[in-house]
Image (cartoon, rainbow, N blue to C red):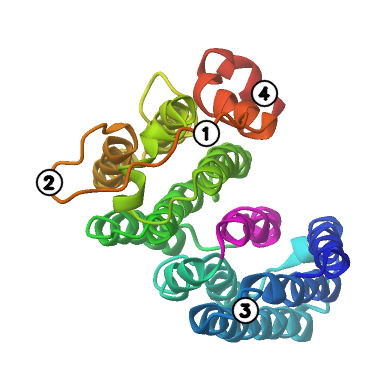
Amino acid sequence: MNPQAKLIFTISLLLGTAITISSNHWIMAWAGLEINTLAILPLISKSHHPRAIEAATKYFLVQATASTLLLFSSMTNAWYTGQWDITQLTHPVSCLILTSAIAMKLGLVPFHFWFPEVLQGAPLTTGLLLATVMKFPPITLFFLTSHSLNPTLLTCMAILSAALGGWMGLNQTQIRKILAFSSIAHLGWMTIIISFDPKLTLLNFYIYSLMTAATFLALNSIKALKLTTLMTTWTKTPSLNAMLFLTLLSLAGLPPLTGFLPKWLIIQELTKQSMAPAATVISLLSLLGLFFYLRLAYCTTITLPPHTTNHMKQWHTNKPTHITIAILTTLSTMLLPISPLIYPLS
């Protein structure tokens, strides 16, 4: 792709995100979301592969439908209450339609079917944008309207997302699809707490984005798209593979690592809100995700493939690991000890 075109699309992405997260009026928020959608489409379809074109088409149709629902929700609220302010969403029908629209934007269950397919068709760098940057504006709208939304509905959607995200990722061999289902499961954790402590949702999103960025950039560096490819990359960059192993365990939420922090705080807050059964269920469902993260981590560090077919060993590269990956992987594994400082800042 032409560098000037790529620069324009990247600036448009940042502009759309900035407009949505800083707006008070529904029309401005909607305009920002539309700019975002139009800017990411060429980045998804830039390889001109049929799968990439299909992914871009699916993404466009789903996002256009979600934007229409969001606009309809705000217009219904304005019709009944005379308010266009985002924080003044009070009409129950509008709240229900908005929940559906944002769930569709994010890829929450039951509107999750498009996300794995789109991520599979996009390049790894665009997949990183889809899994992190493109989710920030809808999460912000969730944050601003969290006091108006139905907590029971959100809890049901969150538990279903954690269940399906973990269960459907078990049998995958494509790394991008595994990360897509991982994203759906993480969204379940963000959604379950948003009615009770919206700041925890944002903290969870920030830490998830950090770990996902580290994972995607590391995979992009070693050019791994399938589990079979991942098994033979240890000869190429052993140190990067070791850090990728720790980042994947952090994404799983294992205790000594950064990924445990949001899960710990969310379980604590749910227990305070007398929602111990929901906390227990979502904690048990995260074990499904732990299984495929351990599978990925095992494939990352394996030095001898567990079958007799000959694999072409990759040449060890002396190319230094990019400083961004080094910083992100370090933050993805070592932030837990300073959690008393992080939580008040959020």
Looking at the image, residue 242 sits to the left or right of residue 345; the answer is left
Give the Cα separation between the discs numbered 4 and 3. Answer: 34 Å
Residue found at x 46% / y 27%: 243
**Residue beneath disc 2:** 307
Q: Position of residue 284 (x, y in %)?
A: 24, 42
Disc nearest the viewer among 2 and 3: 2
| Rendered image: mark on residue 181 | none
- Residue situated in front as seen by the camera: 30 or 298: 298
Q: Secondary structure at mark 1?
A: loop
| Earlier sequence position, callout 2 versus callout 3 | 3
Q: CA distance from mark 2 to mark 4?
A: 50 Å
* Crowd around label 1: few <14 · some 14–19 · many ≥20 (10 Å): few
What's drawn in magenta, residue-wise? 123-148
Q: Secondary structure at mark 2?
A: loop
Q: Quadrant of residue 168?
A: bottom left
Which mark is in front, 1 or 3? 1
- Give the labeled residue for mark 4: 344
In this view, the residue in front, 240 or 43, is 240
